[in-house]
Image: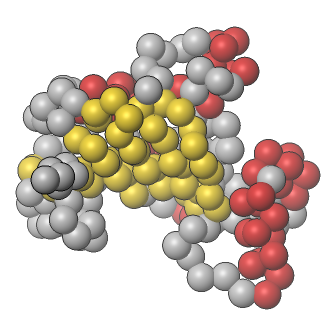
Amino acid sequence: MNQPLMTLDLGCGKKKRPGAIGVDYSDRHNADIIHNLNVFPYPLADEGSDVIYMDNVLEHLDDPMRVMEEVHRICKVGGQVKVIVPYFRSLYAFIDPTHQHFFTVDSFAFYDPDHIICQRYDYVKTRFKVERIVFNETLETHGTKRLIVALANKWPDRYERYLSHLVPLDDITYYLRKI
């Protein structure tokens, strides 16, 4: 018999994912565990989670590299991590005064040993394979913007280099796997 997946929703706020254990700093939200994600270590077991969601939370935290170390610690080998953040060219990245960090196509390349950025700069010991990058995954788009999203998702690097300054998209999702 298969065991159910242990799913965490870090920074769940009021929109905790169904079936997930929510972690948030506020008891006014839907969190199961009240904890400030800027305080380390998190009150979670080593390699205890199969799936970890971080939906529009990482840009608010003080030290994203330290956060990703914690995510690496609590995620099982082969586990999935989904990080959703505002895209750095988006109006939404700058409209919120609590945003401290901004993200590009290569923001998680520092964790992927197959990527030249990780090979050159080796800033962190934690390793995640970047399996996929998706723009505006959960946002409804129409017309020309739908075409731009399709192009950006097919060729993220080219979109960022040649088109993103003309037609900025709103958010970016990283699908990571702990290795």
Q: Where residue 82 appears, x then y in whole percent?
A: 43, 50
Number of marks drawn: 0
Quarter where residue 145 is shown: bottom right
In the picture shown, does residue 100 fall above or below 143?
A: above
**Colour mapping used in the image:** secondary structure
Residue at coordinates 72% horizontally, 21% vertically from top-left? 116
In the picture shown, does residue 58 fall above or below 150?
A: above
Left or right, 113 with respect to 39, comes to right
In the picture shown, does residue 133 fall above or below 20?
A: above
Q: Where residue 129 appears, x then y in whole percent?
A: 53, 33
> Residue extending furthest bottom?
143
Left or right, 160 with respect to 83, comes to right
Left or right, 5 with respect to 116, comes to left
Q: Where residue 105 appears, x then y in whole percent?
A: 68, 44
Residue at coordinates 66% horizontally, 14% vertically from top-left? 119
Instruction: Looking at the picture, tell me which residue is in the foreground, 162 or 178.
Output: 178
Residue at coordinates 27% horizontally, 26% vertically from top-left? 73
Residue at coordinates 72% horizontally, 87% vertically from top-left? 142
